[in-house]
Image (cartoon, helix red, strand yellow):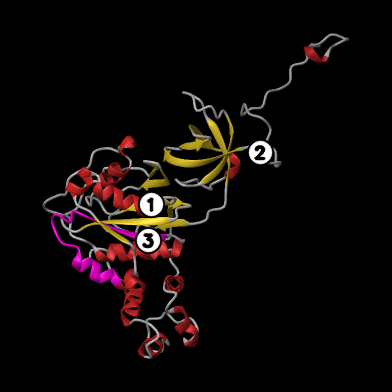
Amino acid sequence: MRRYGKHTDEDDIRSRPNRKGNRPRTHIRPKHEDAAEGMVLTVDRGRLTCLVDGRAVIAMKARELGRKAAVVGDRVALVGDLSGTKDTLARIVRIEERSSVLRRTADDDDPYERVVVANADQLAIVTALANPEPRPRLIDRCLVAAYDGGLEPLLVMTKSDLAPPDKLLELYGALDIPYVVTSREELESGGAADRVREHLDGKVTAFVGHSGVGKTTLVNALVPKDRRRTTGHVNAVTGRGRHTTTSALALPLGDGRDGWVIDTPGVRSFGLAHIDPSRVIHAFPDLEPGTEGCPRACSHDEPDCALDTWVAEGHADPARLYSLRRLLATRERKDGD
């Protein structure tokens, strides 16, 4: 039976719809030259909150980015609805080149690395002086990750009302790491927060520390207008804290200062499977000249290492060489040691 008349019009002919109900695929990728610039503030189940021209905009990653994931601190390009109003959604179409990256793995045997924060200038390593006890091996691991990722370290010691900082300061004194000592009373009064802010002004600082050290309490004192969830307690049996921060979040420093605070979830381990030990020496510029006489692929922790002679001749402090080798050995030690 003839379906159409003799003189049919194009409008009379129905085209067969795409079975998948979407547009035909194309290999031509849009350039999005008019995309707006933004910064990723937090990531939650595939939705990213970005700061665009002072507004918080909810966005999702564009399909053309493939498996490339955006993390807190990333500078991104966005298109779509950038009004930031309720129930609107923009699209991240480009992730800009990163100036620094803080990475970690679940353990030293895990081949899958996780990017924690991008484009941070500084890594604030928060440790309690008591309850829970300091874990120097975990601090060492965070230092290695900071040096490898291009971040300057800052050591923040909390709960000085429970124990003095002398022992920990002696352990890290040769590294010349800036540090701040705080107590709960000083945080409540605001004095300690002001001292910490002096190190954060004009910088993007990521805060990292294991659970229970008071990291979220410190962040709440630094950014009182954007308080995070209340802090948890330290288990009296295990000596470990309970996670109170479940996702990384970037907050403006405020108080008339130009800077950002990135609070990250508490960690119980900090794997370094992704770290190339040969890059750790770059964090010791006073020792680097002494490596010129080292054998090829020297680990700087072996009998033929030229650093031993270099230091013995008085070119550098022996404590610095000890610190370097302690950091290089962190991958061979357990976090709880």
Query: For mark 3, does the 10 Å Cα neighbourhood hold few (<14), some (14 to 19), or many (20 or more) residues?
Result: many
Q: Which residue is at 48% across, 42% downward?
A: 40
**On the image, numbered disc 3 is attached to which residue?**
153
- Tell whether label 3 touches label 2 (CB within 8 Å): no
Marker disc for residue 32: 2
Q: Which residue type does callout 3 highlight?
A: Pro
Q: Which residues are magenta?
A: 152-173
Q: Which residue type does callout 2 highlight?
A: His
The N terminus: image quadrant: top right
Q: Position of residue 231 (x, y in %)?
A: 22, 42
Q: Nearer the viewer, mark 2 or mark 1?
A: 1
Cα gap from disc 2 to disc 1, whole angstroms:
34 Å
Q: Is residue 2 above or below residue 190?
A: above
Observer able to see residue 130: yes
Q: Position of residue 207 (x, y in %)?
A: 34, 51
Pick the residue in front: 5 or 12.
12
Upstream in sequence: badge 2 or badge 1: 2
Q: Is residue 88 above or below residue 196?
A: above
**On the image, numbered disc 1 is attached to which residue?**
200
Upstream in sequence: badge 3 or badge 1: 3
